[in-house]
Image: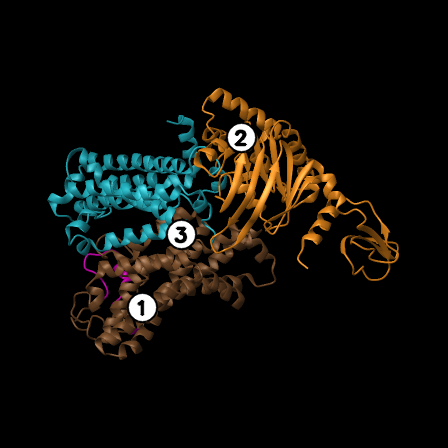
Amino acid sequence: MKPLDLWAHELRRAGPAALAGAPALVLLMALLAILGARLGSRESTTAFMLAGALEWVIPLITGMAAASSLGRDQAVELQLTLPVGYRSTVLRRLAVMAGWTGLCAAAGSAVLAVGGWWGLVPDAPGGPAVQLTWLAPALWLAALGLLASAAFRSTVAATTTVAFVWVIELMFPGPLQASLPSRLLYLFATTRGMVPDDWTANRVVLLCSALPLVAAAWFLLGDAERVLGGETE
Amino acid sequence: MIAALRYEFLMQIRRPVMWIVYGLAFAALVATMWPAYRTLDLGSGGGHDPKLAMVVSAKVTMSLLAIVYGCLLADRLIRDRRLGVATIMDASSANPLGRLIGKYAGVCAATAAPIALAFFGRAVVYAIAEGKAEALAWSVPVFATAILPGLAFLGALALAGPLLMPPLVFRVLFVAYWFWGNLIPADMMPTLSHTIFAATGDYVAYGLFDRGSEGGFVYGPWPDAALNFLRPVASPAVAVLWMGVMVALAAGILLLARLHAARSEH
Amino acid sequence: MRIQLSQLTKTYKGGVHALKGIDLDVPTGMYGLLGSNGAGKTTLMRILAGLLRPTSGTVRLGGDDVTTKEGRLAVQRTLGYLPQDLGVYPDLTARQFLDYIALLKGLDERPGRRRRIGELLEVVALGEHADRRLKGYSGGMLRRVGIAQALLNDPRLLIVDEPTTGLDPEERIRFRTLLSHLAGERTVLLSTHIVEDVAQTCRYLAVLAKGRLVFQGDVGELVSRADRQVWTVTTSGAAPSTGRVVAALPHGSGMRYRVVAPVPPDPMARPAEPTLEDGYLALMEAAAPV
């Protein structure tokens, strides 16, 4: 375990722009929860939008951040000469970003809990499992973003991949849930409909399937020559 | 301007990563939309009319591949600054606005090339499979009117947006905008989706090519939706208006980008 | 730390031969690596730093073979590396950046680490700017941050790749002096295409041209390659057509040329004392394909 200072530096290194998205989202959620009725939004619509903010936008933020992890590193050549493996550094950064976004998402989830909004989301489970609403897709898209970043070595290509998968998943809940394998890998099972008994299995499968994506990225990041050759366009 | 256009076009079209990402996206599109992408009727049973089939093909292409198009464009203008080319360009005698337009046209044309390939390729496959060569004739005006204006606007937005905010923030906002402002049902929340400002080309599909004619569907205001004043009933005139809005937005954004660059030069 | 390269080759994907059969022995102290742009210097530096794998040949640094994972790790623990394009993290201050790199170099003990950073900031004369964000630093200041980070772990081997490119004359002299002071017990490998940098700091050097090692030895030996090949020609007519003109100065109503050529380039040519630059040019002329 590296000293806490290293984690603090990683947080600072990410920069305010990369860190501002998640708290801004939570602020918007809080405003919507408070002002939704006055703006003429029906309770069920407000609840749907609040849950959607957690289940859709938090994963988009983590996925895009992970997809930028290699391309945004200006000091990659120096990093690759350090005795601490570069892939450990990349994973630490991902953990910092995911941790910060997760902290904000937990605060957003608390907004829903305090206002009783979770009860109005038909497919949302009770208890702590409700946190899997955002956690599972966020980690899965982050893993995909990391793999895309390591495979393409191009921020543009990696973020485009994440964006495309995100849009496809949101637009086509029907076809993507038609068969069991694709249903278990569907990202937005809480807000875009799901066979009720499959919800927990879906979340667990998402979390487990993120691991091979990270493992593949880990493998690719181990090749310094390959990492160094990226982002030439 | 022509030199910038040519250079940017060649630079972008030679990027292998662009073709790889489009290829993956197209494969995902076909896999997800099957069999609707095969019949080109989106479940309405109208896939045997070549005109409507091309309109549906345009809709599918714009809805999904436009996000790839926008994201791939999002670093092109700021790249000049990062690589230090911008200063050299600024010192050249070329007119900055002309250069910007040339760059915009070149890079957008190259990034739209895979979309054109997918669309016209689908038209050829349709024409052969259905034995209806007129699909090829319809594909040209459909592409020019339902797809190109939207791409013109999105191209300007994606190029200029990262000038105002960090690229990462822009990409997240762009994807969220695309979903919120173009894809969701109009009655889900207050949205630009299905308005005259949406880039998906529905007004051309319904106003110029009578997509709703078979079921007697009138495209326009949505029941219980906010911002319905931005959703006039589709007609040929409104379709032309939509094209004008897209082109005007693109021109306005490019002008703002030039003004922004001029301000930061001083 | 002694560096020994034997039959080192590097071929990139696409068939570009960056290094061709390099045999080189680098002793402790300051050592220059000269070569034009594209000669293969950066590839060689990156192989030594463990960033690139050689296609064939052996690379031993102080007894460690950098082509193996263990050897590479052992070298990286004692390595200071300043890449040609040093990227930094603009939102960090110089002190934070150095602290961050120090942690990644394994300097976990906080008081010792902070003391070391303080010392190095003074060495590179950045003490009073240490708490400013790097996004506001000039090119010269960033280079100095770069050398400070390279020294954090008190390396036995310091590799600096084109460190003075883009610096103003004052910064360049300051940087060269700093590098010379750092030599002593460690090996400092200075890669550059600026002959003057090597002339002012190194006793020994090697020269690369198109991926081949065309010279290794001491500075005097390279200078002597231009013995009886350097001439001055004062004329009001055209520049000499024989040899390579290395300088042209207005002289009265005409020009005075300094020319490197194996034979007098003009009947009025006078022999001149060669410099390292003349030696380098004579070597390059001789190495160039006819």
Residue identifier under label 3: A156
Q: For the residue carrying disc 3, how many other residues have a C-alpha within 10 Å: few (<14), some (14-19), or many (20+)?
A: many
Looking at the rendering, which quadrant does residue B107 occupy? bottom left
Q: Which chain does the orange colour mark?
A: C
Give the amino acid type for the residue marked by disc 3 in the picture.
Val
Residue B61 image position (x, y, % from top left): 29, 64
Closer to the camera in the image, C211 or A4: C211
Q: Is residue C228 left or right of residue C210?
A: right
| Chain of the residue displaying label 1 | B
Marker disc for residue B91: none
| Chain of the residue displaying label 3 | A
Give the amino acid type for the residue marked by disc 1 in the picture.
Phe
Q: Report whether residue B180 is seen.
A: no
Closer to the camera in the image, C43 or B1: C43
Q: Which chain does the brown colour mark?
A: B
Q: Report whether residue B184 is seen.
A: yes
- Going 54% across and 24% down the picture, which residue do you hit? C116
Separation of residues labelled 2 and 1 (CA atoms)? 55 Å
Give the magenta range. B219-236
- Going 16% across and 33% down the picture, which residue do you hit? A127
> With respect to residue C242, does C214 lie above or below?
above
- Going 25% across and 60% down the picture, which residue do you hit? B228
The magenta stretch spans residue B214: no
> Taken as a whole, is the magenta stretch helix, strand or loop?
loop
